[in-house]
Image (cartoon, helix red, strand yellow):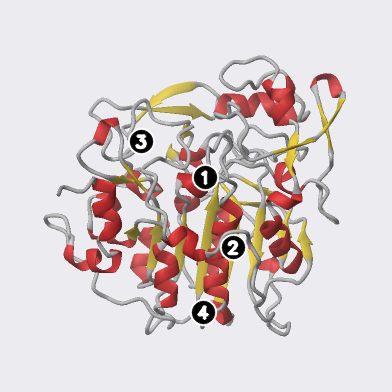
Amino acid sequence: MKLPIWRLVWTVPVTACISACSAPGQAPLTAPLSARAPAKRKLPATPIRHVVIIVQENRSFDNLFAGFPGADAPLVGKGYGGTDIPLVAIPFNTPDIDHNYFYGVDDVDGGKMDGFSHNVYAYGKSGYAVKYAYSYLERSLVEPYWKMAERYTLADRMFPTEQGPSWTAHLDLIAGTTNVTPSTAVINFPSTSPYDCWAPAGTTTQTVNAQKALGTGPFPCFDQFRTMADTLDAAGVSWRYYAPAIFGDTCSDCGYTWSAFSSIKNVRNGSDWHNVISPPPQILRDVANGQLAGVTWVVPDDLYSDHSEVTQRPWGPSWVAAVVNAIGKSAFWKSTAIVVLWDEWGGFYDDARPPTPAFNGLGIRVGCIIISPYAKRHYVSHTQYEFGSVLKFAEQVFNLPPLGSTADGYSDTRSNSIIDSFNFKQRPIKFKHVDAPYPPSHFLGLPPSARAPDDD
């Protein structure tokens, strides 16, 4: 009996596939991951040896945390012309609101933060913006996020590095830039899917330059900028990127992985590709088996993404809780910093005016929770952060050089590190289980959806 390809991927143990499923010309990854720091490398005097970046999809800070005590999280928004619009409670499953680069610019409206009401419509349907953009998820739906934010640090000034959708946001989370020249950055999704090195010939990207002029950019298989893979590899620091496998019309007889590293030429076409692991719940098994990389990214499957217009129940908060609980109850807890963040705003209202340190950003504010035995307790950080702040923290932890200069567009050099949300002199916080509606077994038992967690 011939199994469908998603079943083949699901039933092949990922750890076995790392060494047994190498592509031609690629060496398998054989070195086991461990709790120890890289050998013969001088590290700064912090107890952190593992940085885990858990990525969720498409929610503004206000949409997640409206009403959170001590945070900039109002329950009333501003509409066009400065009118007050009360935020209304919504379920996860609402129509998707347009949220590409251009809509983000319109939402910000020159800093007035009032464009959500007249420029953003779901599928062009008038009235959807007011009904759904000016909204928040009731605490009961996102209780695991609130519990984590209350126990550790909630950052209420986390801005995506640039204005735009998920594809560029995920690139910023591994590279701190999408600049293909010092004054030209890629925006929005490429012209054709899959949006990576496997795209059909002739696929192009869209760019914006320092003069705000639009242009046509290169094929989405980049070698124009460095990524964390380059600096981590050079320093001997292990890394892994857990991401969903996708199967679609353009790749019906094969699978590709919805990973930012799919668009990085030297990773996608080299031995480093074995650091990209699918399906995402494998991280639960790996941690239980004593494996956690120095730096780890975790991206959800569509089934448990926080993206609007999901057809499933709201599984995203339980998914994040499962990963946090797996690390929290393991030997890794005492040496780990976990950053939970949302890649972009998804079209939902937010009141915080984004700073503009570059011509293509910053983007509209998103949620960010910093979890660690050394995260400041019951703390709301008002420090301005961006995605480069997380990369900068990882560079400090592992004594790594910056990816590049601010002049060349790299955000890790210009940004404030999240290190000020830690107190390494405090008594380490004892981990407390994060209660969630769905247990880890729920996610371990799910077959992959074969859908991207976000494609807009």
Identify whether 444 is placed above or below 246. Answer: below
Q: Earlier in the sequence, mark 2 or mark 3?
A: 3
User: At which x and y percent is residue 218?
Assistant: 33, 31
Q: Which mark is residue 195?
A: 3
Q: Secondary structure at mark 1?
A: loop
Mark 3 belongs to which amino acid?
Tyr
Quadrant position of residue 283:
bottom left
Q: Earlier in the sequence, mark 4 or mark 1?
A: 4
Query: Mark 2 = which residue?
Result: 321
Quadrant position of residue 94:
top right
Q: Residues within 10 Å of mark 2 (few under 14, many from 20)?
A: many
Q: Earlier in the sequence, mark 1 or mark 2?
A: 2
Mark 4 belongs to which amino acid?
Phe
User: At which x and y percent is residue 437?
Assistant: 62, 59
Distance in Å between CA atoms under marks 4 and 1 = 37 Å
Q: How many marks?
A: 4
User: At which x and y percent is residue 186?
Assistant: 45, 34
Identify whether 109 is placed above or below 43. Answer: above
Query: Mark 1 = which residue?
Result: 407
Identify whether 396 is placed above or below 264. Answer: below
Mark 2 belongs to which amino acid?
Ala
Q: Residues within 10 Å of mark 1 (few under 14, many from 20)?
A: few
> Which of label 1 and label 2 is nearer to you?
2
Query: Residue 266: in sight, yes or no?
Result: no
Distance in Å between CA atoms under marks 4 and 2 = 16 Å
Q: Earlier in the sequence, mark 4 or mark 3?
A: 3
Query: Mark 4 = which residue?
Result: 332
User: At which x and y percent is residue 253?
Assistant: 20, 39
Q: Earlier in the sequence, mark 4 or mark 2?
A: 2
Q: Is residue 42 left or right of residue 230?
A: right
View extreme (left): residue: 24
